[in-house]
Image (cartoon, coloured by chain):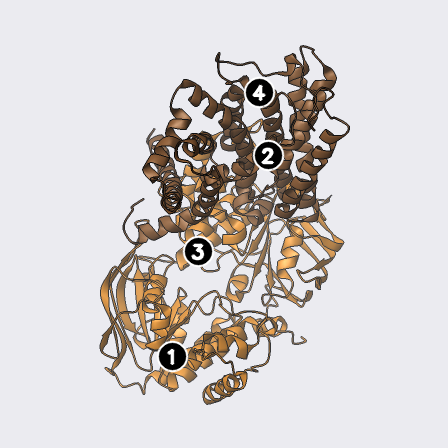
C-alpha cells in the first residue's frame, strides 16, 4: 500500500516535468507568434482569441476541431511508438497517402457490400505498414538511417499516387485527377447531425488511443520499445532483439498513418485526392514531440494543433492575417519542444522553477 | 605468497623515505574550509568538509563510493559549485567557478575517464588545452612538452597518436597536459583503477618525481594499500564528512580500513578447489574487433562447474571480444562455444541467457543498465518476458515491484524506492543492481568482467562473497579482470591473455606473480 502511494508520487514528478516542458514549448511558441502578429500589425490577444473562438466557439466548430484532431491523433500515436524507440519516422505523410490510396482502391473495387468499410480500413492499415516496412527493413537489417529513407519515400509515395490518380484510377465522373467516389457502405457514419463528426473520431480517441496506451505502458513490447530507445546496447545485452523491435516500431507507426489516411477519405473527402492531407504526417511529428511520446499527452497535443489549424482560418478572416501562421506555430513548436529540456534545466538551475 | 602488494610495499618504503625530509607545518598550497554540497536530488555529498594540502605533499583522500571524495575534488577543480564554504589557494580566498579558473589558479584534475582525443597526437591533444592565439604552432607545443617532460623524466613521443598508446601512457599524457598548463596542484581521481601493477609502479614513480619538484598531488582512492603506498598524509571521508586526517607513516592498514568502513573486518572465506565437470568449453575461438582486426586468435579453455577461472591481461588484449563472443554480443569468425554440450556459437544473446549464462559487463553504465529506466525495470531486463513479470506479453508491475524490493534489501542497494530511476543511484549501487540481477537468475555460468572496478572495500567484499556462494553451488565463473589482486584472490586457475592468445596457464600451486605480470605485458615466459 505504502509502495503504491510512493509510486504514484514518483510518476507524478515525471509527469510534472513533462507538463512544464509542454508549457514552456507552447508558451515560447505563442510568444514568438505574438511577435509575428505585432510585426504584421495585428493585436496578438485578439488573434489568439479568434483562434480559440474559431476552434471551440460553438458545437459545430468544436466538432470540426475533433474532426481535424482525428488524423493528427492517429498519425501521432504511431509516431509516439516509433519515437519512443528512437526510430525517427519522418515518413508518416507518405505512409498516410499510401494507406488512403490502397483503402480507396479497395473500397471502390469492392463496391457496396456490408464488409467494404472494414476491409478497406484493414487494407489501409496494411498499406501504411507495407510502405513503412521498406525503410524499416533497411534500418533493421542494413543499418541505413531511417530519417533519410522515410523522408524520401514521402515523395515516392505522393508522386506515385498523383500519377495513379491522373491515369489508372482517375475518376470517370469528374474531370479532376481524383479517384472515383467510395461506395456509401465505405463511408464512416456521422455521429452528430449537421456536423462532419464521424465514427473515425471514436476510432482514434476510444480505440486507437487506449490500445496504444496499453501497448506502450503495460506490455513487454512497450518495455522493449523503451529499452531499445533509451539504451540499445543494454537492450541487446538483456536479450532484446534490437533490430526487430525497431522494425516493429516503424511499421506500427506506418500502419496507424495508413489508417489515418483512409479515415480521412471515408469520413471527410469520400474520394482520394492528391491534396488529401495538409501535412498531417509532419504535424504528427510536432504532436508526438510535444506530447513527449505519452499517448495521453499526444491526444492533448493533437487537439491543440487541430484547434490552431481550424482557429487560424477564423482568425485570418477576421484580422486579414495569413493562414500560414499555422506552419509558423508548428515550426517554432518543434524548436521549443526540442529546447524545452534545456530551458527547464536552466530555469531549475536559476531557481525560477522547482521540480 | 607473493601478491602485487609486493610492488606497493616497496614503493611505500620509498614514499615514506621521502616524506622524512618534508618539514612539518609548511605552507598550505590549498585550504578548503567548511564546504557543503547537496545535489538537486537531495543527496548530501559534502558536509562541512575541510582539508588542507601542503606544498610538495602527496595527499590521499580515502573513502568508499559515495563518501563524497569525487564531489570534493570536483568542487576544488571547478567542475561543481559548492553550496557554501571557502577555498584558499596560497592563502588567498578564491572563487573557483569553472575548470578554466581552476587551471589559472594552478589546480588541475585527471579524471577517471580520460578526456583525450584518440585520433590526435600527443602534441595535438596538449595544444588543445593551451591558450590559443589563433595560430597553432605545433613546434612550440612540442618544444614545451619536451622541456616539461625532460625536467620530470616523463618520457613521451609527442608525435604518436593517443590510440596507439597503452592506458598507462595515456594517463601520463593527461598529467603532462596539466603540467604544460603550469598546474601546481594535481588531482588524480582513482588513477590506478585502469592500470596494471607495473604501470601502477610507473605512475607512483611519476608522482614521486612531481613531488620532488614541489608539486602537490591529491590522489583519490578507495584502496587502503594504495593510500599507504604513495601518500604523505591521508584524509578519510565517510558519508560526506571528513573523518580524520592522518600522517601516513603513523597509521596502518587495519586502522585505515576500520576508519573507511566503520567497524569493518574482512570476513570472506575463500575456498579454492573442488571443481566439478566441464561446463563451458571454448575451442579455437577467433573473433574480430571493432576495426575488423582479429582480436581473439584461437583461444581454447574449459571452465568447470564450481571453478573460478581468472583471465588476467592488460585491457585491450582481446578480453572484451572474447567475453562478447561468449555472451552473444559479437560474432565469432570460427571456433565453438559449448555449454553442457549445447552449441552456443553465434546464437542470440537471448538464447545464451536462457541457457544460463549470466554476464556482469565492465561498462555497467552503457551496457549493464538503462539509466533512465527504474530500478525494478532494470532488475527484470533479462527476464521480463518470463512469468511472473509478464504473462502473454502483459507486464505485471506488482510482481516486478515485489521482486525488486526483495533484491534491494538482499543486495543492500541504496534505492529509496523500486521505481526510482537508476540515474539517481551512485556508481557502486548501480553495480550492486547489475550483480543482483545477474546472480539471481539461477545461471550456471557467470562471466564477470571487472566485477569490482570502482567499488569500495565493503561493496567489493560483498560481490566476492556472492561469487563464492555461487561457486559453492556449482556455478562456473569466468573472471576477467585487469586487477591482478582480485584475480589472485579469487581464482582457482589463471589464464594470461596477451594479444588475443592465451600465453600462460597457472594453477594455484604454481602461481608466480612476477611471471604473470611479465606475460601480461608480452614478455616471453
Choose between A39 and B161: the one closer to the eye.
Answer: A39
x, y (%) of residue A143?
Answer: 67, 49
What residue would you read off at disc 1?
B183
**Quadrant hosting residue B292:** bottom right
Q: Circle 3 marks a residue in which chain?
A: B
On residue B449, which mark appears?
none
Q: Is residue B38 left or right of residue A98?
A: left
Q: CA distance from mark 4 to mark 2?
A: 21 Å
Visible in this render: residue B403? yes
> Contact (CB < 8 A) between labels 2 and 3?
no
- Who's brown, chain-wise? A
Pointer 2: residues within 10 angstroms few (<14), some, or many (20+)?
A: many
Label 2 sits on a secondary structure element that is helix
Q: CA distance from mark 4 to mark 1?
A: 72 Å
What residue would you read off at disc 4?
A267
x, y (%) of residue B370?
Answer: 50, 46
Judge if badges 4 and 1 mark residues of a common chain. no
x, y (%) of residue A317?
Answer: 43, 31
In this view, the mark in front (3 or 1) = 1
Q: Circle 1 marks a residue in which chain?
A: B
Choose between B348 and A75: the one closer to the eye.
Answer: A75
- Name the N-terminal-most of marks 3 and 1: 1
What residue would you read off at disc 3?
B461
Residue at 48%, 13% in the rendered image: A192
Pointer 1: residues within 10 angstroms few (<14), some, or many (20+)?
A: many
- Who's orange, chain-wise? B
Q: Is residue B153 left or right of residue A99?
A: left
What residue would you read off at disc 2?
A253
Label 1 sits on a secondary structure element that is loop
Q: Is residue B249 above or below residue A241?
A: below
- Name the N-terminal-most of marks 4 and 2: 2
Amino acid at each position: 500500500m505504502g509502495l503504491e502511494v510512493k509510486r504514484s508520487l514518483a510518476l507524478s514528478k515525471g509527469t510534472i516535468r513533462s507538463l512544464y516542458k509542454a508549457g514552456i514549448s507552447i508558451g515560447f511558441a505563442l510568444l514568438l507568434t505574438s511577435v509575428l502578429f505585432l510585426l504584421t500589425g495585428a493585436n496578438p490577444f485578439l488573434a489568439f482569441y479568434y483562434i480559440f473562438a474559431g476552434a471551440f466557439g460553438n458545437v459545430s466548430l468544436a466538432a470540426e476541431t475533433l474532426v481535424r484532431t482525428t488524423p493528427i491523433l492517429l498519425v501521432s500515436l504511431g509516431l509516439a511508438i516509433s519515437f519512443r524507440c528512437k526510430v525517427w519516422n519522418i515518413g508518416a505523410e507518405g505512409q498516410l497517402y499510401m494507406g488512403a490510396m490502397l483503402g480507396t482502391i479497395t473500397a471502390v473495387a469492392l463496391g457496396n457490400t456490408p464488409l467494404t468499410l472494414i476491409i478497406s480500413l484493414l487494407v489501409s492499415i496494411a498499406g501504411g505498414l507495407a510502405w513503412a516496412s521498406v525503410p524499416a527493413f533497411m534500418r533493421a537489417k542494413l543499418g541505413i538511417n531511417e530519417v533519410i529513407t522515410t523522408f524520401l519515400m514521402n515523395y515516392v509515395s505522393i508522386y506515385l499516387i498523383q500519377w495513379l490518380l491522373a491515369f489508372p484510377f482517375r475518376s470517370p465522373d469528374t474531370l479532376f485527377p481524383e479517384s472515383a467516389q467510395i461506395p456509401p457502405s465505405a463511408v464512416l457514419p456521422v455521429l452528430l447531425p449537421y456536423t462532419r463528426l464521424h465514427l473515425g473520431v471514436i476510432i482514434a480517441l476510444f480505440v486507437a488511443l487506449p490500445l496504444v496506451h496499453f501497448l506502450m505502458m503495460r506490455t513487454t513490447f512497450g518495455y522493449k520499445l523503451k529499452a531499445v530507445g533509451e539504451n540499445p546496447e543494454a537492450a541487446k545485452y538483456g536479450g532484446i532483439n534490437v533490430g526487430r523491435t525497431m522494425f516493429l516500431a516503424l511499421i506500427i507507426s506506418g500502419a496507424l498513418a495508413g489508417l489515418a489516411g483512409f479515415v480521412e477519405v471515408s469520413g471527410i473527402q469520400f474520394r482520394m485526392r492528391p491534396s488529401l492531407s495538409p501535412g498531417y504526417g509532419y504535424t504528427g511529428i510536432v504532436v508526438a514531440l510535444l506530447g513527449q511520446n505519452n499517448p495521453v499527452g499526444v491526444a492533448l497535443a493533437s487537439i491543440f494543433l487541430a484547434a490552431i489549424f481550424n482557429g487560424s482560418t477564423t482568425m485570418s478572416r477576421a484580422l486579414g492575417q495569413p493562414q500560414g501562421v499555422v506552419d509558423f506555430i508548428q515550426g517554432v513548436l518543434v524548436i521549443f519542444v526540442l529546447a524545452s529540456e534545456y530551458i527547464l534545466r536552466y530555469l531549475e538551475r536559476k531557481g525560477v522553477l522547482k521540480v | 605468497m607473493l601478491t602485487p602488494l609486493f610492488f606497493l610495499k616497496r614503493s611505500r618504503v620509498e614514499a615514506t623515505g621521502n616524506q622524512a625530509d618534508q618539514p612539518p607545518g609548511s605552507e598550505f598550497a590549498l585550504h578548503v574550509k567548511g564546504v557543503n554540497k547537496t545535489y538537486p536530488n537531495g543527496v548530501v555529498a559534502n558536509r562541512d568538509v575541510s582539508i588542507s594540502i601542503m606544498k610538495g605533499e602527496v595527499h590521499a583522500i580515502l573513502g568508499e563510493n559515495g563518501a563524497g571524495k569525487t564531489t570534493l575534488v570536483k568542487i576544488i577543480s571547478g567542475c561543481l559549485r559548492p553550496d557554501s564554504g571557502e577555498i584558499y589557494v596560497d592563502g588567498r580566498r578564491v572563487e573557483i567557478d569553472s575548470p578554466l579558473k581552476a587551471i589559472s589558479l594552478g589546480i588541475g584534475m585527471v579524471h577517471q575517464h580520460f578526456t583525450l582525443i584518440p585520433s590526435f597526437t600527443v602534441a595535438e591533444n596538449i595544444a588543445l588545452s593551451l591558450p590559443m592565439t589563433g595560430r597553432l604552432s605545433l613546434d612550440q607545443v612540442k618544444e614545451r612538452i619536451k622541456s616539461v617532460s625532460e625536467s620530470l623524466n616523463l618520457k613521451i613521443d609527442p608525435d604518436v597518436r593517443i590510440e596507439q598508446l597503452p592506458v598507462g601512457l595515456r594517463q601520463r599524457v593527461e598529467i603532462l597536459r596539466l603540467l604544460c598548463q603550469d598546474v601546481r596542484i594535481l588531482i588524480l581521481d582513482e588513477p590506478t583503477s585502469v592500470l596494471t601493477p607495473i604501470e601502477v609502479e610507473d605512475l607512483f614513480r611519476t608522482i614521486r618525481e612531481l613531488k620532488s619538484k614541489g608539486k602537490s598531488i591529491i590522489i583519490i582512492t578507495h584502496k587502503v594499500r594504495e593510500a599507504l603506498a604513495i601518500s604523505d598524509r591521508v584524509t578519510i571521508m565517510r558519508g560526506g564528512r571528513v573523518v580524520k586526517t592522518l600522517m601516513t607513516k603513523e597509521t596502518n592498514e587495519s586502522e585505515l580500513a576500520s576508519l573507511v568502513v566503520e567497524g569493518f573486518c574482512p570476513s570472506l572465506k575463500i575456498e579454492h578447489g573442488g571443481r566439478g565437470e566441464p561446463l563451458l568449453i571454448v575451442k579455437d575461438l577467433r573473433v574480430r574487433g571493432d576495426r575488423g582486426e582479429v582480436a581473439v586468435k584461437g583461444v581454447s579453455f574449459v571452465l568447470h562447474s564450481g571453478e573460478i577461472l581468472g583471465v588476467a591481461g592488460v585491457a585491450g588484449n582481446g578480453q572484451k571480444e572474447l567475453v562478447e563472443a561468449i555472451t552473444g554480443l559479437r560474432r565469432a569468425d570460427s571456433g565453438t562455444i559449448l555449454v553442457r554440450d549445447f552449441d552456443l556459437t553465434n546464437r542470440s544473446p537471448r538464447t545464451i541467457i536462457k541457457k544460463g549464462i549470466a554476464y556482469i559487463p565492465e561498462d555497467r553504465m552503457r551496457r549493464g543498465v538503462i539509466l533512465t529506466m527504474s530500478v525494478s525495470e532494470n532488475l527484470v531486463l533479462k527476464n521480463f518476458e518470463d512469468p511472473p513479470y509478464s504473462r502473454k506479453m502483459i507486464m505485471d508491475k506488482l510482481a516486478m515491484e515485489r521482486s525488486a524490493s526483495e533484491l534491494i534489501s538482499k543486495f543492500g542497494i541504496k534505492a529509496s524506492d523500486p521505481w526510482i530511476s537508476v540515474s539517481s543511484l551512485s556508481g557502486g549501487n548501480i553495480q550492486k543492481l547489475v550483480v543482483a540481477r545477474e546472480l539471481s537468475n539461477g545461471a550456471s555460468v557467470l562471466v564477470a568482467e571487472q566485477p569490482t572496478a570502482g567499488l569500495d572495500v565493503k561493496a567489493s567484499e560483498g560481490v566476492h562473497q556472492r561469487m563464492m556462494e555461487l561457486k559453492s553451488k556449482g556455478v562456473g565463473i569466468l573472471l576477467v579482470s585487469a586487477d591482478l589482486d582480485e584475480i589472485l584472490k579469487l581464482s582457482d586457475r589463471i589464464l594470461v591473455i596477451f594479444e588475443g592468445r592465451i600465453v600462460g596457464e597457472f594453477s594455484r600451486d604454481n602461481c608466480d606473480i612476477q611471471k604473470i605480470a611479465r606475460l601480461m605485458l608480452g614478455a616471453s615466459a
